[in-house]
Image (tube, grey):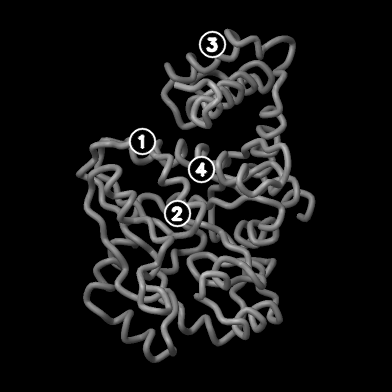
Amino acid sequence: MDPSSPRQEEKLEAAVRAAWLYYVAGNTQHEIAEKLQVSRPTAQRLVALAVERGLVKVRVYHKVATCLELAIALRQKYNLVVCNVVPVNADDGDQVLRKMAVAGAQVMESYLDEIEARIIALGSGQTIKAVIGELNSFNRPQHRVLSLVGTIARDGASNPYDVALQAAEKIGSKCFLLPAPLLADSAEERKQWCRHRLYKVVEELSTKADVAFVGIGDVRRGCPLHRDGFLTDDEVNDLVKTGAVGDNLGWTFDQNGDLVEVAIQERVTSIQLPRPSKKPVIGFAGGERKSKAVLGALRGHWVNGLVTDETCARAVLAAD
């Protein structure tokens, strides 16, 4: 394998995280295993790898150490079940997406690799799609994967960012798609979609989900929902005027994480998860541009887990 590949780089960064927790933070190997969501033998190997590569001197000489500090600060401030902050050299969208995809896949695999049957709920979006693309293949036919977001776009085509089927194929499990558009044409039509028998099947499954992985979107002119035709110019303008900064599964919220009062909310068909959730709801979002959306999602308890980059993490902590 190419030693400079994203997956090899992510393995090295995981080794640095383990070394930092062991030598700087004073964690036991058992505590490291719990925090990194790996087995104890894996935690031992990661620490050994960091030493082998010469990364451990008096302190850990790697930029990931700073990211660990940011992750710990975010985890403690917002009581997160998991927080992974990836290092980036600049607010480069392609670099952020690539590194987050690798880090996100590692987090997701820690849940997918379970032998016991699991129900995995998924949102949609570019970042989630990239994460799924980095997943290893598992043989987990006992799991069930479901989509929390409507699979139909405004023009009747399939949602290009719906990834539930792709994820199910990766692990060989059954997939349940939400039979509805992301946005109904009216509030009355939304009720009709949501009363459908197949919609109720997925909705019921969502209440039993063991974990959910969702994207955190920003709201502005040119944002993905606008760019991809889910929102019109007027709808975006209305959302911005009401103070919307982010969206979760199509539900738009302000800087405090509260749902904004705008007519479009009455047309969203996505399944809204409980807030705060008793189960892990892990959000994926990076880049300084999304920092307000991430902050709102954390304040509003839309997520209780986060995979982001250091630029976004710094902006979130500085703003709050």
Q: Which mark identifies residue 278?
A: 2
Q: Dot 1: within a 10 Å radius of its alpha carbon, few (fewer than 14), some, or many (20 or more) residues?
A: few
Q: Nearer the viewer, mark 2 or mark 3?
A: 3
| Residues under numbered marks 4 and 2 in contact, where contact means CB atoms less than 8 Å apart | no
Residue beneath the point at 41% across and 74% down: 153
Query: In terms of secondary structure, where does tag 1 sit?
Result: loop
* Residue type at tag 2: Lys
Q: Quadrant of the N terminus?
A: top left
| Residues under numbered marks 1 and 3 in contact, where contact means CB atoms less than 8 Å apart | no
Q: Nearer the viewer, mark 1 or mark 2?
A: 1
Residue beneath the point at 20% across and 44% down: 141
Residue nearer the viewer, 81 or 126: 126
> Which residue position is annotated with label 4?
101
Q: Quadrant of the C terminus?
A: bottom right
- Alpha carbon distance from label 1 to label 4: 12 Å
Q: Earlier in the sequence, mark 1 or mark 4?
A: 4
Q: Is residue 216 above or below residue 68?
A: below
| Residues under numbered marks 1 and 2 in contact, where contact means CB atoms less than 8 Å apart | no
> Which residue position is annotated with label 1?
136
Residue 274 percent location from the top left of the image: 45, 64
Describe residue 25's horizontal placement relative to residue 128 as left or right: right
